[in-house]
Amino acid sequence: MKSYPAVAVITGSSCCPAVKVLKGAKKLATEMPSLPLPDCTMPRQCQCRFKKYADRRSEDEDRRIFGASERSVWYSGQQRRKSPTRRKDK
């Protein structure tokens, strides 16, 4: 399974207009520009930081097909196996 680490910008008490566009947006860590942003108007006073996430998707986001079982997604025909398992010792 692939890993998709993500980050979101957390702003300080005062932030520049350039970072307000990214505030709270979760993006892949490899796609997010470094801080302070190149067009930051106050780079020496920048208090913006990244909040790290293990995955770019939210915890409650489920991309599976609703109502479909795992078996029906992969093969919808009739099973032709002679034994219920592929293991020889069972």
Image (spheres, grey):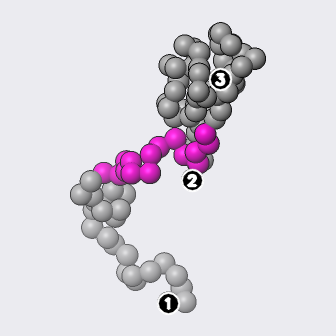
Find numbered disc 3 in the image and state the secondary structure of the residue it sits on: loop
The x, y position of residue 61, in whole percent, is: 38, 48
Residue 35: in sight, yes or no?
yes
| Membership of 59 in magenta stretch | yes
Checking the image for residue 1, the label placed there is: 2
Find numbered disc 1 in the image and state the secondary structure of the residue it sits on: loop
The residue pinned by badge 1 equals 90
The x, y position of residue 70, in whole percent, is: 35, 62
Q: Quadrant of residue 47?
A: top right
- Residue 33's place in the image compared with 26, above or below, is above
The crowding category of the residue bearing disc 3, from other C-alpha atoms within 10 Å (few below 14, some 14 to 19, many at least 20), is few
Give the main secondary structure, helix, strand or loop, of the magenta stretch.
loop
Q: Which residues are magenta?
A: 51-65
* Foreground residue among 59 and 51: 51
- Residue 61's place in the image compared with 19, above or below, is below
In the rendered structure, which amino acid carries the disc numbered 3? Pro
The x, y position of residue 35, in whole percent, is: 69, 24
* Foreground residue among 73 and 60: 60
Judged by depth in the image, the label closer to the viewer, 3 or 1, is 3
Real-space Cα separation, disc 2 to disc 1, in angstroms: 29 Å
| Membership of 87 in magenta stretch | no
Residue at 53% of width from left, 24% of height from top?
A: 22
The x, y position of residue 10, in whole percent, is: 58, 33
The residue pinned by badge 3 equals 33
Choose the circle earlier in sequence order: 3 or 1. Answer: 3
Horizontally, is 77 left or right of 37 in the view? left
The crowding category of the residue bearing disc 1, from other C-alpha atoms within 10 Å (few below 14, some 14 to 19, many at least 20), is few
